[in-house]
Amino acid sequence: MPGDGGGGPALRDSRLLGPGRRHGSADALHPRTPLRRRPVRQGGPLSYEAALAAARQGRLYPAVILDGGSAEARRSAALELARALLCEAPAAARPCGVCRHCRRIVWPGGDEATPFHPDFQVLERDLKASTSVDATREMLRTAQVSPYEARGQVFVIASAESLTGEAANALLKNLEEPHVSAPRNFFLLAPSRLDLLPTLRSRSLAVFLGPAQPVDPQVVEPLARAFSAAASSWASSGSPVYLLSAAAALAGAGGWDDPRSGQPWAVAAAAVLRSLPQEDGAAADRRARLALAEALLEGPALRLRGITAERILEGMVARHLA
């Protein structure tokens, strides 16, 4: 999983503070202060590093979609964020991995020896192809009470894309009625946030974990450098030729002959993720590139409609960077 990205740019993004919180206000500094507004629609995806930095400070948005990556990567991300939210160590050291909360926040395995934490709950698919409304409501009943031990509660929906319509609506009602006594965070895990209902997406912060397919870093690195140079030139000059150059850099992933293959799109997405700027003041650029990386994984579906890879790349780059 991605490591510590630091607390700088993340904590300057008011989207991370949750509804009703603004920088410079008293309640922005106290996560236990009652939330006063309903969640609002979020922008594009956020980097995992920024989300982790916000979780360390107790300022992560109440509902987070963890999408992309493998199922194991999504589980690992949910566990690390949950530990960061409930850890007893000073903010900079969270998650410490050794406190009474960190040691007991683990993925349930059905083993009696598996540690249990009353303020951390995972909802897994209970039916063959879906997560039922009954199982969802049972989890949500726990969310209506105050934390037992920690300063907040964390609820993970392991296969959010499998929520039935009734289950999704039950969850939505809870997201629209924030807990007033203590922080309460929901993590919705899914291969793609587009698999979730628009109403759930609109009330959640998206954290994109990257492509599921493994990619060769030696292939990704030169593509990332070329893409970053072209994107930076576009930002400074506004000349459309640099958008074409950025798309051409991603086309260097190769392997476009098979329209059904997701591998070249995974390589291109990884290159965009590798290019994320880290400078202060580059939050908008980072979000735009994250959204582009996520969109690239939808490339195979467009190829099957008969659209060329070159045209798709040019269109996606222009749509997200221009």
Image: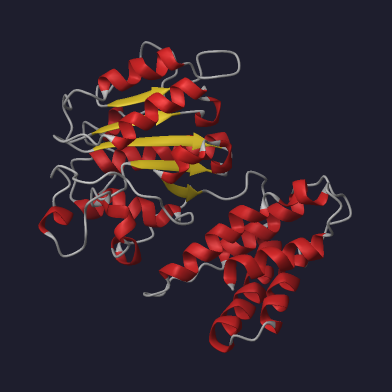
Residue lying at 29% horizontally and 60% vertically, measured from the top left: 14
Residue pushed farthest left?
26
Occupied quadrant, residue 151: top left
Where is residue 130 shown, x and y percent of the image?
55, 19
Side of 175 relative to 159 (left or right): left
Residue lying at 37% horizontally and 10% vertically, measured from the top left: 112
Coloring basis for residues: secondary structure
Say which quadrant the C terminus sits in.
bottom right
Residue 114 seen anywhere in this rendered image of the structure? no
Where is residue 318 shown, x and y percent of the image?
65, 70
Side of 148 relative to 120 (left or right): left
User: 51 above or below 248?
Assistant: above
Residue lying at 24% horizontally and 36% vertically, measured from the top left: 178
Where is residue 95 shown, x and y percent of the image?
29, 44
In this rendering, the count of numbered labels is 0
Where is residue 233 shown, x and y percent of the image?
60, 84
User: 61 above or below 92?
Assistant: above
Residue pushed farthest right?
257
Residue pushed farthest bottom?
237
Occupied quadrant, residue 309: bottom right
Side of 153 relative to 210 (left or right): left
Residue 149 seen anywhere in this rendered image of the structure? yes
Camera-nearest residue between 181 and 250:
181
